[in-house]
Amino acid sequence: MRYGFLLSGYDAKTYGWETVIMFRKILLIGASVFLSTVSTEAQVLLVILVIVLNMFLQIHFKPYFSPTLNSMENYSLQVAAMTIYIGMFYVTGKHYNYMKIDWLSWFFLVILVLPNLIFLLYWAHHMRIEVLKMAHKRNI
C-alpha cells in the first residue's frame, strides 16, 4: 500500500492519526518561522501549548494498538515539553544575571539533558524488545 504509513500501527478507531502528528509538526515549524520576528518567548509559549494539547489528545484517544507505543508517545511529548520549558531559562537568562551563576547553569543543563537521556534509554529498551519479538516471529 502506497500510503500505508498513514494507517499502520494505529488502533481501528484512530486510523489517520498520522495526520494529527503531521499537523503538530506543521504548527511547530510555523511557530518557529512566523514567530521568529515577534520573540523567542512567544515561540516557546506556542510550542508548549501545541505539545500540551497533543498530550491531551494522546491520552484521550490512545491511538496506537500497543500500550507500549501509547506510553512511549506520552513520555516523548512530556520530555519535549520539559526540554522546551527548561530551554526557556537559557533564553531568558541572557536578560537577567541568574545564568551567570555557575552551579545554576549546570543545574539547568542537568535537568535539560537527564530526561532526554532517560527517554533515550527507555526507547532503546522497548525497541530492542520489539525487534526481538519480530525476529522470534520470523523464526517460527
Image: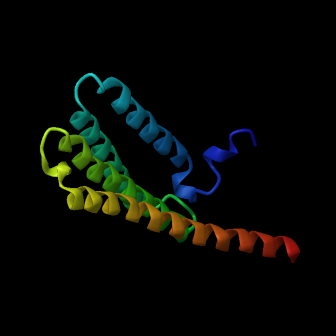
Q: Nearer the viewer, residue 130 or 65?
A: 130
31 relative position to 10: left or right: left
Residue 20, given in percent of the width and then of the height, sits at 46, 43
Residue 124 vertical placement versus 2 (above, below) = below
Q: How many marks?
A: 0
Would residue 53 be found to the left or right of residue 96 on screen? Answer: right
In the rendered image, the quadrant that contains the N terminus is top right
Q: Nearer the viewer, residue 46 or 57?
A: 46
Residue 134 image offset from top left, x and y in percent: 75, 69
Colour convention: rainbow
Q: Quadrant of residue 94?
A: top left
Q: Residue at x 51, y 63 (%)?
A: 120
Is residue 60 visible to us here? no
Residue ID at (63%, 67%): 127
Q: Which of the 4 image quarters holds residue 132?
A: bottom right
Locate residue 105, reporting x and y percent.
Answer: 25, 55
Residue furthest right in the image = 139
Residue at left 37%, top 50%? Answer: 54
Pick the front one: 80 or 52: 80
Q: Position of residue 140 (x, y in %)?
A: 87, 77
The answer to which image quadrant residue 59 occupies is bottom left
Can residue 7 be spotted in the picture? yes
64 displayed left or right of 28: right
